[in-house]
Amino acid sequence: MSQDIRIIDPHVHIWDPRTTPRAASPLVKLLGRWPGVLDRSVKLLMPGPLVDFVGDSRYVVSAHMPSDYHRDTGKYDVAGYVHVEAGWEAKGPMGPVGETEWVDALDDPPLALVAHANLGDADNLAAVLDAHAAASNRFVGVRDMMAAHPSRKIHDWAESTATLTSPEFEAGLRMVGERDLSFDAWVYSNQLRDLSRLAGRVPDTRMVLDHMGTPIALAGPFGGLGQTPQQRDAIRRDWYEDLERVAENPNVWLKLSGLLMCNLGFGYHELDQAPSVSRVVDDIGSHIRHGIETFGVDRCMFASNFPMDKVSISWETLYDAFFEIVGDYSVEDQQKLFADNAAAFYRID
């Protein structure tokens, strides 16, 4: 049945540390000819929590261009992908616009482009959004990463967990909605209640929760969390309950993605042999189905989160598992989950 279903992958990161401003770019340019030395240098200089998050530095220092992505999709004929901002480090308030210009000029550009914007920067946000729009007609939304955790052993992608309660951030999010742009919300599960309240205060801004809210240590110990089965059960219960709170906001959609990042604790990146489809289905199937049942089939979309999840699994195995998880769904519902909902959310023609 999967061969009859169109696929749009709504969460892909395209990058090249050799030619664009990334945190790893100086080391890649200096040591790229010696992969072993590069790997050791990255691990030495990168903060410990970030090393643990990435799992394998190769997926940070290596280019991930459209040609790399399409090789990974293998037997699947993917109609297109959505690029989501990640790691562009050009300086100045207008720096993020460079990523939009670069992605738009690729030989195989995305169907849609989610750019970076600092939503709390009231002085420059409007100008940045205008510049993104001028740089590409593929620009449809923004992401300002908010994932943060009180534990110092967990890598933060935002300055603090208070970002979600900031009046400036809320005002920026409202501006995004007023321009009919979407917002990709990436938080850890400990932040889902704050996200739910924020979404309720900006009901006219379309939001999608990336990676199902990233419940750290859901499946195994990570960063000092989830050390016992009882602790992991509590993480799952709290995560499920808070997902249900977020889903009460009709302006929030859900990306069925990112569950195989290292910080969830499945440990696939440490296996000697790649995980089988049946193992992946057993490990994440119930969580995927809970997400769909909670948000409804019309507000969910499957996504790869490549190359970040590539440390754990191949693209083909991941999508084989996705199709098996929803194999008893109607063809119409599968088409929504694999392409139509992404096209609707991101205004893809």
Image (spheres, rainbow, N blue to C red):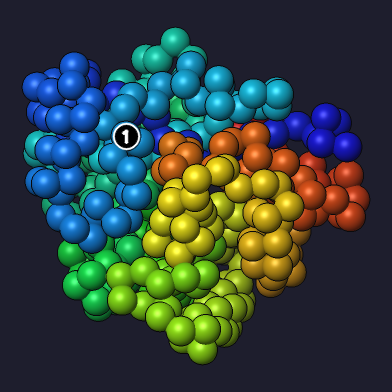
Question: From this viewpoint, is residue 197 visible?
Answer: no
Q: Quick one: 108 or 312, which is closer to the camera?
A: 312
In the image, residue 110 sits, relative to residue 94, either above or below, namely above
Task: Give the structural element (helix, strand or loop) at label 1.
Answer: helix
Above or below, comparing residue 125 to residue 98 in the picture: below
Q: Is residue 302 left or right of residue 130?
A: right
Across and down, in percent, residue 156 comes to 24, 63
Q: What amino acid does circle 1 point to?
A: Arg
Give residue 141's position: percent from left, percent from top.
43, 43
The residue wearing badge 1 is 58
Residue toward you, 238 or 178: 238
Residue that appears at 88% across and 44% down: 331
- Looking at the picture, tell me which residue is in the foreground, 183 or 56: 56
**Is 196 located above or below residue 180 in the figure?**
below
Left or right: where 107 falls relative to 341: left
> Image point 15% across, 48% down: which residue?
46
Q: Using residue 185 as the reference point, say whether residue 121 is left or right of it.
A: left
Q: Which residue: 75% across, 59% down?
A: 297
| Residue found at x 11% / y 46% | 44
Q: Residues within 10 Å of mark 1 (few under 14, many from 20)?
A: some
Q: Nearer the viewer, residue 172 or 144?
A: 144
Residue 6 visible to the viewer: yes
Residue 245 sits above or below residue 23 on the image: below
